Image (cartoon, helix red, strand yellow):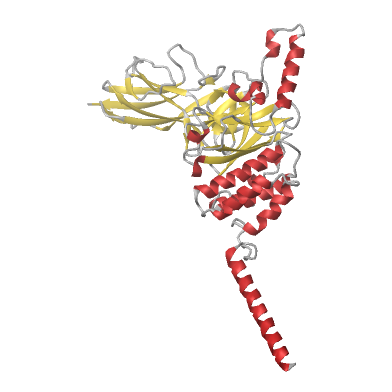
């Protein structure tokens, strides 16, 4: 009996040892028993399965889970890890355009995936606590939320749309984003893996304000991105104002707001039902006696952004002031290159704000009011005016409205340099807009041999 007890004890000890070794091996090989990270921006692989099941009902999350597993298996910081993370994010967006989702659960899942894609501790503003990282409004697709991935290998070149009535209806486009020229891959060439998450949501109805953001934050759009606000109204003074930047250079929003886009989008959630509804409306309307313009597609106002700095709204720009922010020196050497800078501004909500997309012209006169030519910089978006130089206002740092000049004086003597926005035909206004009045500014200099 004593021998059997000893054997039993040895067997039990061996089993305990084997179990202990197995547990130790599992804890090293997989994330399931690993310690939880204390930094809220750090990757937590252990949480992802529960986050997936909390957002995707039934088996609808199988593709997302497969991509998640591949993401975690990939090397940290690699394009493979990013690409698989983007696959999960796109699945999150697809579901939101097919059915009403739990936005809070979707937001938590998106944050969890993003933390494992990037070093989110470097994000500004602070991730994930800043309100800009609440993805729930963007996942409310039926009320205008937008949550899309774009870039190299995503397989789509359509604009990103925020639209009401996406689920089972005819989408009513509220706002959208598309590259100003070229492809999404080209526009996002400077981003890791040439991709970005672009998301947005309506902030207020009156006035209409829409917020767009990206992951990674402050993603740069090479060549610029067109941001459209689609309210069916585009008066000649309307421009897009972006908070923290200023008034954006005007662009037509028709590539975004044109309702025909709502029936050509191939992504999940914008399919045959929307197409059938759109065609039904067109057929009914075609039978009604009405002017042709009644069938016109939705319009709006657009602006050029190089990166997103929060909220976008439409603003009437009727009066613009021009001010020298960098003046030429008071004494200029004949034939020497001179630099100067002028800023175009308007009032937005009683705050002086820069205006992009303005052609500013510098002209020279002598003390008797006779013209004296300036030679130098020219922008192809502006008219060529004899004996004058011009520049197009754009963003400097994080503020809009700056025009930079490089020019030479061609005559000795007193010189008055005037900044205006009057072109060769005597017209004034922002490129693509009209109805604005412009102030002028001038500086005096003495040109010496």
Residue 207 visible in the displayed image: no
Q: Of 296 and 33, which appears nearest the observer?
A: 33
Residue 85 coordinates in the image, percent (x, y)? 58, 47
Q: How many numbered marks are there?
A: 0
User: Left or right of 66: which side holds 344?
Assistant: left
Left or right placement of residue 194 versus residue 2 in this view = left
Location of the N terminus by quadrant is bottom right
Q: Which residue is at the front of the view, 227 or 327?
A: 227
Residue at position x 75%, y 17% in the image: 281
Q: Which of these two is toward me, 388 or 21?
A: 21
- Place of residue 160 in the rendered image (x, y in percent of width and height, measured from the top left): 61, 32
Q: Residue at x 33, y 26 (%)?
A: 407
Task: Measuring from the top left, give residue 438's x and y in whole percent.
Answer: 51, 21
Q: Is residue 79 visible?
A: yes
Q: Position of residue 406 (x, y in %)?
A: 34, 29
Quarter of the figure with residue 264: top right
Q: Quadrant of the C terminus?
A: top left
Residue sitting nearer the eye, 415 or 133: 133
Answer left or right for 26 relative to 220. Answer: right
Left or right relative to 312: residue 360? left
* Residue at point 67%, 85% (across, down): 10
Residue farthest toward the left in the current orientation of the protein? 449
């Amino acid at each position: 009996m004593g021998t059997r007890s000893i054997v039993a004890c040895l067997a039990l000890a061996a089993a305990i040892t084997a179990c202990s070794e197995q547990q130790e091996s599992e804890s090293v090989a997989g994330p399931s028993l690993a310690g939880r990270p204390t930094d809220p921006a750090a990757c937590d692989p252990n949480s992802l399965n529960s986050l997936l099941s909390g957002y995707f009902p039934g088996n609808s999350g199988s593709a997302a889970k497969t991509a998640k597993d591949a993401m975690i298996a990939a090397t940290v910081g690699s394009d493979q890890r990013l690409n698989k993370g983007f696959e999960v994010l796109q699945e999150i967006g697809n579901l939101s355009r097919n059915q009403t989702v739990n936005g809070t659960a979707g937001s938590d899942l998106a944050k969890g995936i993003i933390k494992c894609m990037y070093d989110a501790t470097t994000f500004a503003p602070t991730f994930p606590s800043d309100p800009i990282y609440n993805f729930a409004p963007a996942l409310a697709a039926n009320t205008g939320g937008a949550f899309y991935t774009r870039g190299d290998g995503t397989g789509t070149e359509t604009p990103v749309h925020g639209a009401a009535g996406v689920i089972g209806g005819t989408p009513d486009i509220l706002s959208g984003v598309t590259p100003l020229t070229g492809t999404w891959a080209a526009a996002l060439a400077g981003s890791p893996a040439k991709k970005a998450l672009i998301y947005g949501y309506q902030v207020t109805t009156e006035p209409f304000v829409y917020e767009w953001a990206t992951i990674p934050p402050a993603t740069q759009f090479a060549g610029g991105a067109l941001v459209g606000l689609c309210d069916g109204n585009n008066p000649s003074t309307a421009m897009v104002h972006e908070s923290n930047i200023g008034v954006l250079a005007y662009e037509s929003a028709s590539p975004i707001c044109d309702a025909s886009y709502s029936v050509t989008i191939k992504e999940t959630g914008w399919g045959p039902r929307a197409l059938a509804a759109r065609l039904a409306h067109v057929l009914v309307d075609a039978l009604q006696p009405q002017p042709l313009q009644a069938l016109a597609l939705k319009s709006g106002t657009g602006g050029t952004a190089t990166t997103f700095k929060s909220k976008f709204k439409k603003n009437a720009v009727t009066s613009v002031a021009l001010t020298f922010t960098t003046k030429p020196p008071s004494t200029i050497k004949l034939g020497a290159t001179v630099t100067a800078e002028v800023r175009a501004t308007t009032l937005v909500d009683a705050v002086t704000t820069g205006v992009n997309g303005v052609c500013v012209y510098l002209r020279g006169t002598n003390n008797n009011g006779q013209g004296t030519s300036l030679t130098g910089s020219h922008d192809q978006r502006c008219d060529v005016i004899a004996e004058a130089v011009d520049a197009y206002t754009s963003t400097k740092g994080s503020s809009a409205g700056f025009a930079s000049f490089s020019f030479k004086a061609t005559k000795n003597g007193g010189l008055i340099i005037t900044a205006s926005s009057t072109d060769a035909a005597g017209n004034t206004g922002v490129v693509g807009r009209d109805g604005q009045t412009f102030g002028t500014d001038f500086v005096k200099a003495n040109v010496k041999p």
